Amino acid sequence: MNHPPEPLPTAATVIRSGPLTWVQQWHWYERTIPGPRRVNPTPLADHCHVPPSTTVADIHMALASLTARHEALRTTVDPLRPVQHVHRADWAPLPVDCVDVPAADADTLEAATAALAVRPIDPERNPPWLARVLLEAGKPRAVLMAAHHVLIDGWGLAVLLNQLHDQLLGDDAPAEALAHPLDTVAAQPLERARAAEREWLTRLAGNPTGVLAPFGGTDDGEGRHRLQHRSADAYDDLVRIARRFRVSPEVVMLAALAHDVATRTGEHRFLASVVVSNRARAALRNSIGVRALTVPVQIDLRPGAVFGEVVASVAAASAAAYRHGRWRPAELVAAQARMDRRRGVVTVPTIEYNCYSWPRDYLAPAYNSPPNGPVTWICSAPDEPCDTLYVDLGLDAGVVTLDVTVGDHLLDAEQAMALPVRLCGFLRALADGAECPVPERSLTPAASGWWRAPQGWVCLPKVEDVLRGHPGVLDVTVAPSGEAAGEGEAPHLVAYAHTAPDVTPDHLHRHVLDHLDEVPGIVAPRCYVLSPDGLESGRPSDHSCTAIGGPGALRVSSRPPASEAERALAAAVVAAVAVVGSSGLVGPSGLVDPSGPVGPSCPVETTDPSQPGGPVGPGGLPVGSSDSPIAVDMNRCLADHGVTLVAVPRLLALLHRSGFTGIASDELAGTASLGHLAAALKPLSPRAHRGGETSP
């Protein structure tokens, strides 16, 4: 095997620099998350065959031509800031090697592509892609390519392979100018970005998230079901419905999923997390840069509305989500997290929806299954549970493919298999002319041990288990109160806890908040944050009655850092906020752009009298606080202090420099308090690896 030499990038090779785009920022942050815990861990890798007369020199020449054409192939990213640098076309050797194989058959191609996909790519020093030529008897038979998602997306990799194949056939390259993500950043109007951010926060503030009801399933809720359903008949039905309502088939399927959620749960307002990609213009259609974005689509269904109205509503919401989701994503995430904690609900989407299906290499077709008929394959395992329902839609060669991944606490294996069958039956009824109005309410009862809260479904036994885990809690019983119990009040939970004298309701509330991300199934899916609204003031007693839920905001007293680990974390928080807030981003001209899209300030939610410390400043810190670590409140989360997603890698680096480790980057994006995070810190081993993971 021939390995290409590693390049030595220098500032002299950079021809322009600028901030990462609204889409790239997520993947830039995601690369710091351990592989098994990523939202999208699937590596980007694929292959193409080459014409019989092709030589290795021809492949090298074609790849060099593509590198000159596409700036994304010669772009690197900064390890600690969301900044990208475009290099000259000849700045580094082509990352290509050759491998001899006995035969370039389908099995060999699949295995070789998978092997290339797991090879690490360092987007900070090297080109963000790898290529491998498979040689059979000394002749090239196929080219494999892998790409890092921060700079090249799945669509882009397919475009790249198609253009490579065209060049090897001798076809001319496309004539249109190709857009780089930096061109998108340069055209972003800041005022529109801020207006869109305000609109999204306002919309989400009044949108308690509905969830799929936890009907059925096992007691422990630890099963995960993956299945694939294919139907040729559903394809024809989907196309007919899309033409009737003049929308895309993808919108029709999302509307059908929304209708199913409303029918099953009685929810008429919820979120769907939808993957979309804007490649309408030719320059974007042939660009390999990252364009796909996951946006939260707010779905509002009117009880009694016919399906035509449902489709129109979902189509409008999807368009608005894409338009407004593209601006200032890092600030949006942090500001939304602060807002969620204040109003007592975390907006977790009901549906995760992708408009193309993922490869399911763990599923195999049933023996002698008809190629054009409906068939369902399923794989169930005691894997980590799913928070929401994942549905991927594929429309290939006249067949609808639905890939479903769901946790047992939402749907058991039988119910999971029934979901795509039910959706296809629903499409058939619509294609035959049925109006299918949205039902007023669900008649299916909740499973034993679950309570229907205003913001979701709560597992009462698991709430009790979490509270019993707090030191000084001798016994606890959790029960619904208010409207759900027929008392005429706002529905909430009440925890009747027998505690030691030094345990207060605030202690118990903080304990539950810190453990929401650690205890699977405490809520379905972790979308009901408990708050101590309605507590009686006074000295702690050995019988503490804690109200849980309700519309009140979190009121927890502030606490400065005490231990060495807490002081190190507080110092890192102050430094991370100060660096990002003061330096801004490197603009397209190479100069500092203090108005860049990833600073910690946010024009929304600038005051919050209910929070300890009074009004909240633009950076998320209480007004009047200093920039000293001693002023950092350990009872508040990172988002409260203005630490955005894009500041997380720098904060981790600062912690490592202080000699501490033990916190994963995805934990820093949650709602756990700084005190809880600091408790997980441990001294850094002298031989510990200090670099970030760089695999795709």
Image (cartoon, rainbow, N blue to C red):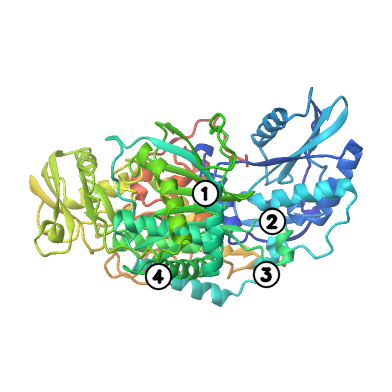
Looking at this view, is 398 or 385 the one in front? 398
Measure how far apart labels 2 and 1 are at the Cα level. Answer: 22 Å
Task: Check disc 4 and report its element: helix, strand or loop.
Answer: helix
Residue 177: x and y, percent? 80, 65
Query: Residue 186: which disc?
Result: 3
Looking at this view, is 301 or 191 the one in front? 301
Residue 234: x and y, percent? 52, 52
Measure how far apart labels 3 and 1 are at the Cα level. Answer: 33 Å
Measure how far apart labels 4 and 3 are at the Cα level. Answer: 28 Å
Looking at this view, is 64 or 86 the one in front? 64
Earlier in the chain: of badge 4 and badge 3, it is 3
For disc 4, the neighbor class at 10 Å (few under 14, some 14 to 19, many from 20) is few
Query: Residue 203: which disc?
Result: 4
Measure how far apart labels 4 and 2 are at the Cα level. Answer: 30 Å
Query: Residue 392: which disc?
Result: 1
Q: Quadrant of residue 529?
A: bottom left
Against 129, residue 487 (above or below) is below
Q: Is residue 210 visible?
A: no
Earlier in the chain: of badge 4 and badge 1, it is 4
Task: Check disc 3 and report its element: helix, strand or loop.
Answer: helix
Residue 298: x and y, percent? 42, 65
Q: Amino acid at mark 1?
A: Asp
Against 46, residue 526 (above or below) is below
Give me the residue at 49% from left, 57% from top. Answer: 253
Looking at this view, is 593 or 71 the one in front? 71
Q: Amino acid at mark 2?
A: Gly
Give me the residue at 89% from left, 45% from top. Answer: 61
User: Mark 2 = which residue?
Assistant: 289
Horizontal side of residue 246 vs 309, given as left or right: right
Task: Check disc 2 and report its element: helix, strand or loop.
Answer: loop
Horizontal side of residue 285 vs 561, given as left or right: right
